[in-house]
Image (spheres, helix red, strand yellow):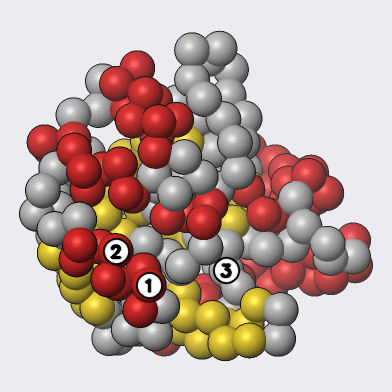
Amino acid sequence: MKVKIIFNNDTKNENLHTGWGGSFLVDGKILFDTGENGAYLTENMDNLGVNLDEISAVVISHDHWDHTGGLWQLLKNKEGLRVYACPNMSDEFKNKVKTLKGVLEEVNGISEISKNIFLTGEIAGEYKGEYLAEQALIAKSDKGVSIITGCAHPGIIKMVDEVKNNFPQNDIYAVLGGFHLLHHSKELIEGIVEEFKLKGVKKAGPTHCSGHAAEEIFKVKYNGDFLTARTGSEIEI
């Protein structure tokens, strides 16, 4: 199964937009998050040969502008697009999806939304002292299960544990996305890397809000098993 990075904070291709937030196309048909800007997202899709008609659903990890920003343009371009959200995302978000004639699906618990593609359902997180609902995507292949996160506000270890508890017979092949470690200490980040290793995570790809320090520490510790998630790149999971 392949993951194509549609939007992220860096790229080697000068024809692609970069910025804050992320967007990952899973198995050519499920879009996980939409980055900060609709024009950036759709232009990147065009430049990468991604046809919106072939996308069956969009998953939104959590209700922050840098993950929902491109969604509104997609809904304007494709009426009836299915959008998977957490039950406790804001009414403003839900109403906007419905106003733009998207089909809103609120996910409770582990749910298979396409063959071998699952969502964790809502996991409790916190942002600036307030409750924040967030979900992750799980892709299952012959390599094991891989996890794609938006920002991991609930805690990246908590989210990995949620997947391990629900897929006890499967190894965790890769964890990719935002780990929310931007302002964390070197010691804490190194502790998280060790936790990854102890939990058997084979490959790691921190990006977005993970921060440069975390990316460098993971890169050293994971060496050849580090995943570089640049806009326009493709990762086999």
Question: In this image, 215 relative to 175: left or right?
Answer: right
Closer to the camera in the image, 198 or 118:
118
Crowd class of label 2 (few under 14; some 14 to 19; many from 20; radius 10 Å): few
Q: Image quadrant for the N terminus? A: top left
Expressed as whole percent of the image width and height from the top left, the position of residue 70 reads: 39, 44
Q: Which is nearer the N-term, disc 2 or disc 3?
A: 2
Q: Residue at x 29, y 64 (%)?
A: 96
Identify residue for label 3: 152
Query: Does 143 appear above or below 18?
Result: below
Amino acid on which disc 2 is placed? Lys
Question: In this image, 52 relative to 213: left or right?
Answer: left
Which quarter of the picture shows residue 140? bottom left
Closer to the camera in the image, 102 or 180:
102
Q: Residue at x 47, y 80 (%)?
A: 133
Numbered mark located on residue 96 in the image: 2
Identify residue for label 1: 92
